[in-house]
Amino acid sequence: MALIDDLKKKYPQSLAWAFGDSPEMADELSDLVCRGLKTASCGSLSAFREDPDAPRPGSINIILNGQDVPVCVIRTISTRLLRFSEATEALAIKEGEGDLSLEYWRQEHKEFFTREGTYSDDMEIVAEEFEVIELL
């Protein structure tokens, strides 16, 4: 926890969180971010609205792995609203997961949003692009 506290002093108003909905997913996705392969993410608009700390352009976030250890710090560059069915190959590539195909992206995100209880083909999602500003 001391490292997180030190990072929050260095990056005031930053939040510490992990990608995904399991420790395994957090490890996999944080590794992709640290290697520069993942520069985007997305979430359901409903989850975004419920979270007062949802990423906004310019926000700084401390990314944790599956053991809640900080691995990097990112800055949100942009967010945009689109429907699940409107996701593009470009978004899939920026998310950096699997074989980078839109098919893979749709299958994995359909499963994730189904677990979250929000999935529909016309659901609205918030796509976030970010940059790594510090590797830890």
Image (cartoon, helix red, strand yellow):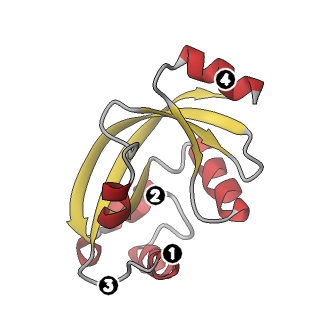
Separation of marks 2 and 4 at Cα, in angstroms: 28 Å
Q: Amino acid at mark 1?
A: Phe
Which residue is at the front of the view, 91 or 7? 7
Q: Secondary structure at mark 3?
A: loop
Do residues under tags 2 and 1 come within 8 Å of each other at their CB atoms? Answer: no
Do residues under tags 2 and 4 come within 8 Å of each other at their CB atoms? Answer: no
State the residue position of label 1. Answer: 112
x, y percentage for residue 97? Answer: 54, 64
State the residue position of label 2. Answer: 95
In the image: residue 5, left or right of residue 127: right
Q: Residue at x 39, y 52 (%)?
A: 51
Q: Secondary structure at mark 4?
A: helix
x, y percentage for residue 10? Answer: 56, 15
Sequence-earlier tag: 4 or 3: 4
Pair 2/3: label in front: 3
State the residue position of label 4. Answer: 5
Q: Amino acid at mark 3?
A: Ser
Q: Secondary structure at mark 1?
A: helix
Do residues under tags 2 and 3 come within 8 Å of each other at their CB atoms? Answer: no
Sequence-earlier tag: 1 or 4: 4
Which residue is at the front of the view, 98 or 17? 17
x, y percentage for residue 5? Answer: 67, 23
State the residue position of label 3. Answer: 120
Badge 1 crowding class, 10 Å Cα cut-off, few under 14, some 14 to 19, many 20 or more, is some
Q: Amino acid at mark 4?
A: Asp
Q: Quadrant of residue 24?
A: bottom right
Separation of marks 1 and 4 at Cα, in angstroms: 30 Å
Separation of marks 2 and 3 at Cα, in angstroms: 20 Å
Do residues under tags 1 and 3 come within 8 Å of each other at their CB atoms? Answer: no
